[in-house]
Image: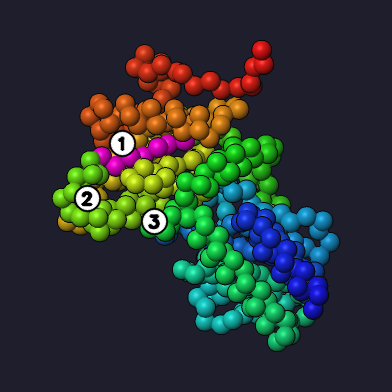
């Protein structure tokens, strides 16, 4: 019992979701002594959904492995390749045991809103009823703790990440280790660029929406825009609502053209979407490359200047800070680099 309590204390001792998943598989490995325990999540758009490995730990592994958060979605296995995982996600049973050389038990992993993945436990013999109940109880604690993290880290209206999580996740994302990306099962993944881009999105004339239609309709516009963001960007792009009508995206692209295309897709999707009662809504977007040594505030300031330029020059457009500086439309006043001592 004391070992279980220790693991539960460790499980709820972290605010980092990646560490939380690693701690979860570590706890179940120590408690059940399986051959392998893995957490898989379903990611991607409808019609191209894939399995991403969040944490995998074998009986002799010193540390857990996982697919890179920025993995190319086409390099991940399609959901249909593993029908037993899909069966577990449907919630038709607490556990699905797959016959074969070893016993494979699968449990749905859920949040307060939906089932998001599967916990897969491989053992020599089928798990006992007591062990299955133990796994189910730990997964309920995991779900409840995830809900607490959502409450503190996500905007209550849109479900996007909130402003106070930005600095930490910015530094974490932009300081990811380099090297050859490997999947958790040993597959070599396509090499990805390590250039990051920060985009700031501002709704044009949003005040008039609130004034003319009321704040309830204004909130509906914000909610629908957040859904457009989720469908316009990739599963691993980080999406934030900073407050009011201001949104932020932190993404990984090979070059400025790819970043501009992704943001232009968001602008176009918004302009063509029929918002109920309001009709057409447009957005202005400014973006910048995250430079070596950048601080979150410095990168945001550059993108914000590009947004201001877009809004003062016609709105409903995407502007690159670097391009504006190169054309002489903006001065590059950001000071990035080491602190000089005098």
Which residue is at the front of the view, 172 or 132?
172
- For the stretch drawn in magenta, the main secondary structure is strand
Rendered position, 304 above or below 225? above
Where's the C terminus, which quadrant?
top right
81 in magenta: no
- Residue highlighted by disc 3: 158
Residue at 77 percent across and 63 percent down: it is 58
Residue 121: percent from the left, percent from the top?
A: 70, 71
- Residue highlighted by disc 2: 210
Where's the N terminus, which quadrant?
bottom right
Q: Secondary structure at mark 3?
A: loop
Region of the chain picked out in magenta, as a range: 198-204
Residue at 60 percent across and 22 percent down: it is 337
- Residue highlighted by disc 1: 284
Rendered position, 266 above or below 161? above
Q: Earlier in the sequence, mark 1 or mark 2?
A: 2
């Amino acid at each position: 019992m004391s070992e279980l309590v220790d693991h539960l204390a460790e499980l709820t001792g972290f605010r980092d979701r990646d560490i939380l998943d690693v701690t979860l598989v570590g706890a179940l490995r120590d408690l059940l002594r399986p051959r392998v325990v893995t957490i898989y999540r379903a990611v991607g758009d409808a019609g191209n959904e894939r399995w991403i490995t969040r944490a995998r730990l074998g009986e002799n592994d010193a540390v857990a492995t996982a697919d890179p958060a920025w993995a190319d979605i086409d390099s991940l296995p399609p959901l249909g390749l593993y029908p037993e995982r899909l069966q577990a996600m449907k919630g038709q049973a607490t556990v699905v045991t797959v016959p074969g050389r070893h016993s494979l038990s699968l449990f749905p992993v859920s949040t307060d809103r939906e089932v998001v993945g599967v916990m897969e436990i491989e053992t020599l013999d089928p798990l006992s009823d007591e062990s299955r109940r133990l796994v189910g109880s730990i997964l309920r604690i995991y779900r409840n703790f995830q809900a607490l993290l959502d409450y503190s880290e996500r905007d209550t209206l849109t479900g996007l990440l909130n402003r106070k999580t930005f600095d930490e996740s910015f530094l974490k994302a932009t300081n990811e280790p380099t090297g050859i990306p490997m999947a958790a099962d040993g597959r070599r993944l396509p090499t990805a660029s390590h250039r990051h881009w920060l985009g700031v999105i501002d709704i044009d004339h949003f005040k008039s929406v609130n004034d003319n239609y009321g704040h309830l309709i204004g909130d509906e516009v914000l909610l629908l825009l957040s859904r457009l963001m989720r469908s316009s960007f990739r599963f691993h792009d980080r999406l934030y609502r900073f407050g009011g009508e201001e949104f932020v995206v932190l993404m990984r692209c090979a070059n400025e053209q790819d970043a501009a295309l992704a943001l232009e897709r968001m602008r176009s999707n918004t302009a063509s979407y029929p918002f109920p009662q309001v009709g057409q809504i447009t957005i202005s977007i400014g973006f910048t490359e995250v430079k070596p040594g950048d601080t979150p505030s410095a990168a945001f300031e550059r993108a914000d200047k590009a947004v201001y330029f877009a809004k003062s020059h016609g709105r409903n457009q995407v502007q690159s800070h670097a391009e504006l500086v190169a054309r002489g439309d903006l001065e590059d006043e950001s000071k990035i680099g080491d602190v000089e001592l005098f």
